[in-house]
Amino acid sequence: MKTLRLLTAVFVSFMISTVPAFCEPQGGGQRAGQITAMIPAATRNSQTAKTNDALAWGDLLQTEHSGRVRATLTDGSILSLGSDTSLHVVQHDATSQQTSLELNYGKVRSQVQKITQPGGKYEIKTPNAVIGVIGTHFLTEYEGDTTTVTCYEGQLSVTPVNGAQVQNNTGQASNNSVTLAAGQTVQITNAIPPGGFHASQVSPSQAQNGILSTDIPSKEPRTYNPDHTGRWVALGFAVAVGVAVGVTGLSTGNGGNKSNCVPSPAKRCS
């Protein structure tokens, strides 16, 4: 009997001691943020990822072909991972504004809070490029030994490393780096394709596809965007016209007391 009680006590103590381990970020590092939305399947440190999972320094996020992940860092920056993506959260310190991420493959869209601290940095590294920003919205893709960076807002710099070359650049080249502004793109590659690359602006469809491929649909209210005002006004006008037509139809339909008269400039309906 005593042996059974002893074993029970040991088991309960073990279970209690492991509960905090499930609540704390895996990887043993400092807290970096949290997963705020996702489309399965995705993993964090090779374990099934879940919404509200905490992220820590050293964590590895991976999405499968059908998966996507959105994570909010502790400084408010947002990471949106597309499918077939592997992202290593090397470091994120909101106080000193030191952030380092590694994109092994796939695509990630970053909405970065403005860097205001002296010496602050926000970097994403791929196998052949380093992307540094002050505060902006951009997409980074790495596939087939090629890094493609598209800037949506703000400004960022892209620097090739490990013998890679700048190609298809629509930004401003300076020494070995390229500065991108909104609507510009650059490709960093280790091998020039036959025929080379040709400079071209990012088309609206390309830019939109980059956002759609990393977005997670949500029923939450959208943030107000002045650019969308015209769309909502047009939609409201269309709805108003539709309602007016419907009311007119009810009052002049077969089931009403009025005839099926169709009004025109030359004819009035009584």
Image (cartoon, helix red, strand yellow):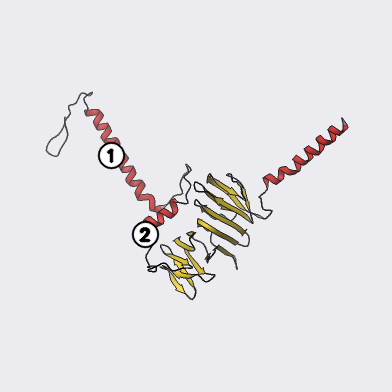
| Mark 1 residue type | Val
Place of residue 43 in the rendered image (x, y in percent of width and height, measured from the top left): 58, 48
Quadrant housing residue 253 = top left
Residue with the most extreme right position: 2
Q: Residue at x 30, y 35 (%)?
A: 243
Q: Is residue 238 above or below residue 143?
A: above
Residue 231 point in image, percent of width and height: 35, 48
- Please rate how many residues cluster around mark 2, counting C-alpha atoms within 10 Å: few if below 14, some from 14 to 19, many from 20: few
| 220 to 29, vertically: above or below | above
Q: Residue furthest left?
A: 266
Q: Nearer the viewer, residue 48 or 31?
A: 48
| Location of mark 1 (residue) | 241
The kind of secondary structure element at disc 2 is loop
107 vs 201, left or right, is: right
Instruction: Answer left or right for 74 relative to 66.
Output: right
- Dot 1, how many residues are within 10 Å of its Cα: few (below 14), some (14-19), or many (20+)? few
Residue drawn at x 12%, y 35% as measured from the top left: 267
Q: Is residue 93 visible?
A: no
The C terminus, quarter of image:
top left
> How far across and down, in percent of the image, does residue 26 sit?
66, 50
Residue situated in front as seen by the camera: 85 or 157: 85
Quadrant in which the N terminus is drawn: top right
Spatial separation of the CA atoms under disc 2 and disc 1: 34 Å
Residue 203 marker: 2
- Residue nearer the viewer, 38 or 181: 38
Which callout, 2 or 1, points at the residue further toward the start of the chain?
2
